[in-house]
Image (spheres, rainbow, N blue to C red):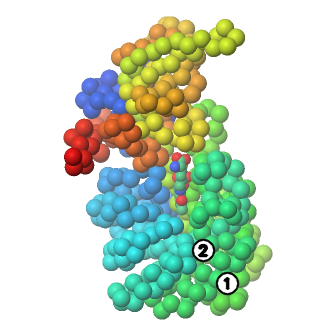
Amino acid sequence: WAENVSKVDGVLTVAGLGVDELAGEFGTPLYVLDEDDFRSRARAFRDAFPEADVYYAGKAFLCVAAARWIADEGLSLDVCTGGELAVALRAEFPPERIGLHGNNKSSAELRRALEAGVGRIIIDSFEEIDRLAALTAELGVTASVMVRVTAGVEAHTHEYISTSHEDQKFGFSIAGGDAFEAVRRLLAVPGIDFRGLHSHIGSQIFVTDGFEVAARRVLRLHAEIARELGVVGEEFDLGGGFGIAYTTQDDPLPPADLARGMLKIIDEECAALGIDVPHLSIEPGRAIAGPSTFTLYEVGTAKTVALDGGSSRRYVAVDGGMSDNIRPALYSADYSCTLASRDSDAGPALSRVVGKHCESGDIVVKDEYLPSDVGAGDLIAVPGTGAYCRSLASNYNHVPRPAVVAVREGEARLLLRREVEDDLLALDLG
Ligand code: LLP
């Protein structure tokens, strides 16, 4: 749960506002974001890595207000499409503090980034070097670039969010020699300024070994490039991927502990290689946005299903589901929840919170003991939905996407309004 969330007489409140009031004013499903929590996690990363640049990964959750908070807190911003860049520019985010990612950036996206003056572009393919060479020549500008490399480590997370084993689409392989070759080629392009190497091993990671192995391998390549190509990359990016708690089973590392571990390895490896420590940057997304938000749903129906062996399970259906949180269906992600609108004396019943979509995999919370009298009209809150929920939301079954409301010191502010059917019908030209 976010910092300012607590229960008062059975009603979940955030920064002094009860969820019953929020549901009444903004409707459900609703993403409820604790602004101070979001900001303080951003600051915690900045403070834990005082010498480094912290790029908030906007893919986790991005809107104009969030981009402004990130700028206010002194962080930089990682965007990975023209669309995310457009939000950053709308927020007047300082372009020199924006980094552009993407394994298949179009020439239009690269052009827009160069015209906006983004601080760095993270190159991910040989074609991109050619595209950038043509664009920088045409526009008469210099692009500061990093080269994304694949360190070949297993990140110990879900396959779909691991990005540093060899057989996946991101980056240039270190082991296969492409990473070295990419740097060699771009050094020959007059409009490209090589800033350093970038590695992102995956997401929702709890153990630091993967980061450490990746850091050592990337630093060895950094030293090899300096030795053989005569250029020293001034920067070094270790990506994001720091895990958060979705249930009580998860045990995330605080940013300060992460920093201690990572910085120690980097110092050791640089000393062993006899090189200066390059300027570090990191890209946390989930660990800043995730815990700040809970999703508020209203229960519509509940039914009890008999299980083999004589036990039973209650299916508690809410007014959203896989369209506002695809993560259980996509990654078998586990969430927890609570009855948010009242106290109950009823005994606990093994419950599965499900959505309203036409799929049996439309699960919000797989297993939770909820009071056995939870039913129509009750509000249920699911914590930890600030990252990769709104940003991955869809209109499946023509369900409009929920609003995002930020709460701070007793005031609620709508950041993203709820879609309405007319928004969806407006796209349909008949
Ligand atoms: N940097 C790069 C280059 C990335 O690709 C990502 C995430 C991040 C930073 C931020 O990672 P974070 O700190 O948020 O873990 N949809 C998936 C996560 C996909 C992550 C994609 N890249 C999920 O819901 O778990």
Viewer-closest of 233 and 41 = 233
Residue depicted at 54% across the width and 22% down the height: 352
Point out residue 10 in the picture as x, y percentages from the top left corner. 42, 17
Residue depicted at 21% across the width and 49% down the height: 429
* Residue type highlighted by circle 1: Ile
* Residue type highlighted by circle 2: Leu
Point out residue 191 in the picture as x, y percentages from the top left corner. 45, 88
**Residue density around tag 1, few if under 14, some if 14–19, many if 20 or more, within 10 Å:** many
State whether residue 294 is above or below residue 70: above
| Left or right relative to 142: residue 230 | right
Residue depicted at 71% across the width and 82% down the height: 224
| Left or right relative to 127: residue 411 | left
Find numbered disc 1 in the image and state the secondary structure of the residue it sits on: helix
Residue depicted at 60% across the width and 48% down the height: 204
Find numbered disc 2 in the image and state the secondary structure of the residue it sits on: strand
Viewer-closest of 214 and 47 = 214
Q: Choose top left, top right, bottom left or bottom right for residue 99.
A: bottom left
Residue annotated with mark 1: 225
Point out residue 223 in the picture as x, y percentages from the top left corner. 70, 81
Residue annotated with mark 2: 197
Disc 2 to disc 1: CB gap under 8 Å: yes
Q: Choose top left, top right, bottom left or bottom right for residue 273.
A: bottom right
State whether residue 278 is above or below residue 308: below
Mark 2 → mark 1, Cα distance in angstroms: 10 Å
